[in-house]
Amino acid sequence: MTSLTDNQQQIRESARQILALKPVYLDTETTGIGSVDEIVEISVIDHDGAQLFSKLVKPTRPIPPGAERIHGISNRQVADAQPWPILWPELRSILYGRTIAAYNSSFDARLMEQTHSRYRLPWRERLNFLDVMQLFSDFRAVWDPFRKTYRYFKLAEAGAFFQIDLLNAHRSSADALLTRAVLHSIAGLPY
């Protein structure tokens, strides 16, 4: 990479400060992106790259074919998986009090809350999410005249920009690892 702009240098320093917090990295795969969709797979990777949690989640309704084509998770695969209310206590204990880095974190946070509500469970969590997509968008600084802000990039595009040798597999563990690598690359550090 060529020399950094002042803005990129500031973002690099912010990324290093985030890494000093030893965040966990979270990614989900879902039945879709709408207001009634829910999580079918969720993974959490520790700050050092170790897998802390990775499980399929049995949804309350079938996985649509379009979602299955994206992530490859079938209804048969989740048929014997535990439902969200069984998995949540363990997952919550991993996330509670930690900085949670995710690529498009507002999506993952919304789907966690939506999945919770599918079981009529009240959502009272105040999780500390950090959006790596927003940080990368600010780092790249490509103006989007339509949105009047910096352009957002897909996780695979962020990985390609830094020439990260990890696949964007649309599976939660692989994507959480790629998110970790992107944050380290923004910080100018090895992953």
Image (tube, rainbow, N blue to C red):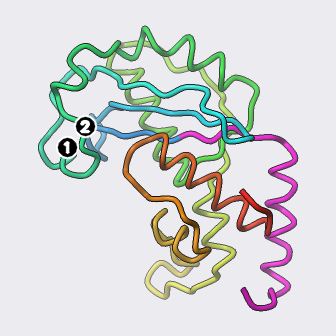
Q: Which mark is residue 68?
A: 1
Q: In this rendering, would 189 be left or right of 104?
A: right
Residue 96 in the image: state x and y as whole percent: 70, 23
Up-down relation of residue 122 to residue 180 (above or below): above
Residue nearest the observer in this picture, 131 or 157 = 157
**Left or right: where 82 falls relative to 43:** left
Q: State the SS at label 1.
A: helix
Q: Residue at x 16, y 25 (%)?
A: 76
Q: Is residue 14 magenta?
A: yes
Q: Is residue 92 left or right of residue 152?
A: right
Total labels drawn? 2
Query: Where residue 159 sits in the image (x, y, percent)?
Result: 54, 67
Q: Earlier in the sequence, mark 2 or mark 1?
A: 1
Is residue 135 shown left or right of residue 74?
Answer: right
Image coordinates of residue 163 in percent, x first then y, are: 58, 74
Q: Nearer the viewer, residue 51 or 135?
A: 51
| Amino acid type assigned to the residue bearing label 2 in the image | Ile
Residue 61 is drawn in which quadrant?
top left
The residue wearing badge 2 is 73
Q: Residue at x 62, y 37 (%)?
A: 45
Residue type marked 1? Glu
Number of residues whose C-alpha sits closer than 10 Å to that of mark 1, classed few (under 14), some (14–19) or many (20 or more): some
Q: CA distance from mark 2 to mark 1?
A: 5 Å
Where residue 52 appears, as percent x and y from the top left, is 61, 27
- Say whether residue 184 is magenta: no
Question: Measured along the vertical axis of the image, is residue 21 above or below residue 153?
Answer: above
Residue 68 in the image: above or below residue 93: below
Please report the bounds of the magenta region as a residue range: 1-26
Are the residues at dot 2 and dot 1 in contact (C-beta closer than 8 Å)?
yes
